Image (cartoon, rainbow, N blue to C red):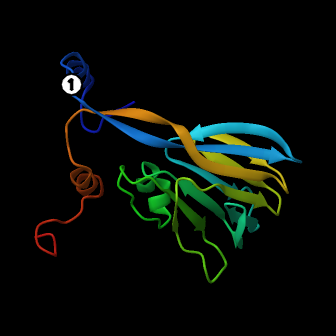
Amino acid sequence: MAEVDSFTFPDVAQAIIDKDYVLDERMLLSFQVKRKNEVVENGWSLNEVSIERKSTTMLELFVQIDQRPLSRWGCDGIICATPTGSTAYAFSAGGPVLWPEVQALVLLPIAAHALFARPMVIAPSSTIIVTIESTDATLSADALRKMDLQKDDQVSLTKNGTLITLAHLKSTIFTDRLVAKFKLPVEGWRGE
């Protein structure tokens, strides 16, 4: 995959021909959906997996980490993101930015009706299990692949054992890309 911001196709083609790019390995997220103790779906994502309500009613989720109960949330959904996805949907929902080199997962409830509903940074060796305790939920992987979930379905989220290689057309430090992407003020505290 290639990161192409303001480049034109001829620029990209020439960079590939000249081998003028930097390769960067990124972690992936795996998901597995079990229904009545039977696996009905397996998949992966580069950015995030979200579980969200399909109707106007609140979604009831029970979350466990490494087979230990974490919390039950009445919410609009939950996002589990990789470091790459931490600057995408998870960031828009109030999650932290993780540098690409950080091996961790972000777990973020969406609009949870709870006292403890903050974004969490989870060890990459952990297994997160989300049980759907209400109906009408949908799973989305990178907003591309979608699946309807039923009451009592269990979604298991883990670090994928495979890395994906991205090509950056210019050698820029992640901090510089972050500043450019979000137009962060770097000249004086008021951006002057």
- The reply, left or right, for residue 153 in relation to residue 114 is right
- Whether residue 144 appears in this view of the structure is no
Callout 1: few (<14), some (14-19), or many (20+) C-alpha neighbours within 10 Å? few
**Which quadrant, please, contains the N terminus?**
top left
When the figure is inspected, residue 184 is found, relative to residue 70, above or below; the finding is: above
Instruction: Name the residue at 44% across, 34% down.
Output: 164
Occupied quadrant, residue 136: bottom right
Q: Position of residue 191 (x, y in %)?
A: 15, 69
Q: Position of residue 185 (x, y in %)?
A: 19, 66
Q: Can the viewer see residue 125 in this picture?
A: yes
Q: Residue furthest bottom?
A: 115
Q: Nearer the viewer, residue 110 or 56?
A: 110
Total marks shown come to 1
Quarter of the image where the C terminus is located: bottom left
Which kind of residue does numbered mark 1 sit on? Asp
9 or 47: nearer the viewer: 47
Q: Quadrant of residue 147?
A: top right
Q: To which quarter of the image does residue 137 belong?
A: bottom right
Q: Would residue 98 appear left or right of 8 to someone viewing this image?
A: right
Towards the viewer: 39 or 146: 39
Residue 15 spot, x, y in % from top left? 21, 23
Up/down of 190 relative to 182, above or below = below
| Residue ID at (52%, 59%) | 123
Q: Residue at x 44, y 55 (%)?
A: 86
* Residue 165 place in picture, x, y as percent: 39, 32
Q: Nearer the viewer, residue 164 or 79?
A: 164
User: SS at mark 1?
Assistant: helix
> Mark 1 = which residue?
11
Q: Residue at x 61, y 53 (%)?
A: 50
- Which residue is farthest right? 36
